[in-house]
Image (tube, coloured by chain):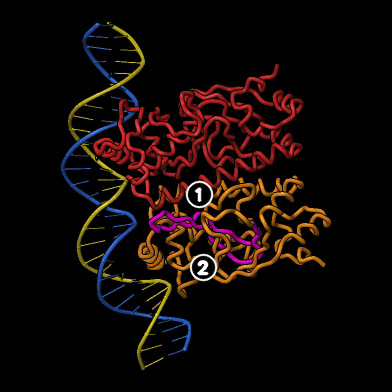
Chain colours: A orange, B red, C yellow, D blue
Amino acid sequence: MSACDTCLVRNRAICAGLESSELETLNTMGRRRTLQPGEALIWEGDESVLVANVIEGVLKLSSATEDGREQIVGVVYPADFIGRPFAGAAGHSVTALTEARVCVFARADFDRFASEHPKLEHKLLERTLGELDRTRKWMVLLSRKTAQEKVATFLLEMSDRLVETGCDHVPGMPLKSFDLPFSRQQIADVLGLTIETVSRQMTMLKRDGVIGLPTRRSVDIIDRTALQDIAG
Amino acid sequence: MSACDTCLVRNRAICAGLESSELETLNTMGRRRTLQPGEALIWEGDESVLVANVIEGVLKLSSATEDGREQIVGVVYPADFIGRPFAGAAGHSVTALTEARVCVFARADFDRFASEHPKLEHKLLERTLGELDRTRKWMVLLSRKTAQEKVATFLLEMSDRLVETGCDHVPGMPLKSFDLPFSRQQIADVLGLTIETVSRQMTMLKRDGVIGLPTRRSVDIIDRTALQDIAG
DNA sequence: CGTGCACTTGAGGCACGTCAACGTTCGTGG
DNA sequence: CCACGAACGTTGACGTGCCTCAAGTGCACG
C-alpha cells in the first residue's frame, strides 16, 4: 500500500484527482519528512532543488533585506504546495512554525512529472492563482492599514485558516478559540510591525473586551463583530 | 490573415508556442481593444468575466480598503496576462496607465480553451509563478523599507522593466533615461506612501546628484551605483 | 530557587502623514 | 497669441503612530 493512500491531505492537495497508477509513480518519487519547529526546508537564494506538499503543520515563507530586516511573505497550511517549480532560485525561505510533515520531491522529477500530467499542472495553477490573490490582498494590509487594523485582521484570518486544520470544529465555522502557531516576533514579521507594537495592540484588544488571552499562545475571540469593525 | 500573425507580443505572451491552427481558434475567440489612460478594464469585486493579454502599454492592478485607501498591487507590461481564470471574483481593478492595447477573451471561453491546451496552461503557470515571486519581493519593500529606499527601488525597477517595452535600447541593458508611466499619486500608491513623501524623496535624490528630473514625467539615472546602494 | 527566554510596559524620538500655501505645466477659449 | 483655470507637483510647518531603547514581569527549564 502506498503512502498516498493514507495521506491526510489526499483529497485536497494537488495530487487529488490523479489516477491510482499516476499516484503510484508520484509516490515512488516523493518521500515523507518531518520538520521540527524552527527547522528550515528551503533557504532564500538557494537554487530551487525541491518542492513539497504540506501534510500536517504550519510553515512560514520569509524573505529578508540585506541588513537583516525579515518579512514573512506567506504562511502555508496542510494541503498547500511549497517551492518553485520550473525555474531558478528560491525567492524566500521556508521554515516550520509548528512540528510539520511534508511530502518532498526533487524539483527535476516533479517538473518532468508535472509536464506529463496536465491535470496536476491545472491544480497547481489554480492553487498558485489563489495564492497570488491572497498575497495581493495582504499587500494592502501591509502598506495601508494601521497597527490596530493589522492585528485584528491577523487574528480573524488565523481563526479562519486554522479551521481547516483543527479537529474540534463545525466545518466552515471560524474558530472562537485557538492556539497561535506564531510567537509575538513572528506575528510582527507577518504584519510588518515590531514585537512591542503587536504586544501593545493585543493588550488593548484584551482591555476593550474584544479578545481574551488565556495563555501567551492562545486566543479567544469574544466579540467577533467588534474585531471585524476594527479590522476595517 | 489572423490578427495573431502581426501581434507585437506573439513570441512572448502565453500564446507563444501554440500551433497555427490553435492560434486560429484562439483568434476567433478574442478581440482587440484599445484603452485610454485612466480607463478601467476590470473592477475590483466584479465577477471575473474576462481575461486578456497586454499587447502594448502599461496597466495597474489596484485594490482599496473600504474607506478608500488605495494600493497598487501590481503593474503589467506588454506580453503580461490579465485577469483571474477558473474562478470567482476579481480581487483587484485593472486600469490603463498609458494608452494600451489588449487582446480580450471571455473568461468562460478562455477557461475551456486552456483546459484543452496543456501547453497554454503551462505557460500561464510559469507566468503566474513569476508574478507571485515578484509580488512577494514587493511585500518586503512595502513593509520593511524606508521611503528613500522605496523610491530608489522603484526607479531601478522601472528602468529594468521598461527596457522590454522601449525601442531605443540595447537588449538587457537597463535604461539611463525614461518616461514614467505614473503620476506622483500613482507612484505613491505603488509604494504605499503619500504624494508629498514621494515628491520630497525625488527632490532629495536630485539634489544629491543621483538622478535628474528634466521634466515631471521623465527621469535620468545619473549615478546608478549610488541609487542601488540607497535602494538597500 | 535561580537562570533564561518570551512577553509586557514605559518613556522618548523620528520618519512619515497631514494640512496648507505656493509654483508649474497644460489645455481651452477668447 | 495670450489669458485663464484646473490639475499636478513642490515645499514648508506641524502632528502623530510606530519604532527604539530600556526596564520590568511572568512562565518554563534545570
- The answer to whether residue A226 is seen in the rendering is no
Question: In the rendered structure, which amino acid carries the disc numbered 2?
Answer: Leu
- The chain to which mark 2 is attached is A
- The chain to which mark 1 is attached is B
User: Local crowd at mark 2 within 10 Å, few (<14), some, or many (≥20)?
Assistant: some
Left or right: B2, with A73 as reference point: right
Q: Residue at x 40, y 65 (%)?
A: A202
Closer to the camera, A155 or B208? B208
Q: Of the residues tagged 2 and 1, which is closer to the observer? A: 1
State the image quarter where residue B71 is shown: top left
Question: In the rendered structure, which amino acid carries the disc numbered 1?
Answer: Arg
Please tell me whether residue A132 belongs to the stretch shown in magenta. Answer: no
Residue A121 against residue A101 in the figure, above or below:
above
- The answer to whether residue A61 is seen in the rendering is yes
Q: Which residues are magenta?
A: A51-79
Left or right: B165, with B148 as reference point: right
Q: Are marks 2 and 1 in contact (CB under 8 Å)?
A: no
Residue A15 coordinates in the image, percent (x, y)? 73, 55
Residue topped by disc 1: B136
Closer to the camera, B58 or B70? B58
State the image quarter where residue A171 is shown: bottom right
- Tell me the SS state at disc 1: helix
Q: Residue at x 68, y 41 (%)?
A: B122
User: Local crowd at mark 1 within 10 Å, few (<14), some, or many (≥20)?
Assistant: many
Residue A147 coordinates in the image, percent (x, y)? 38, 56
Q: Which mark is residue A180?
A: 2
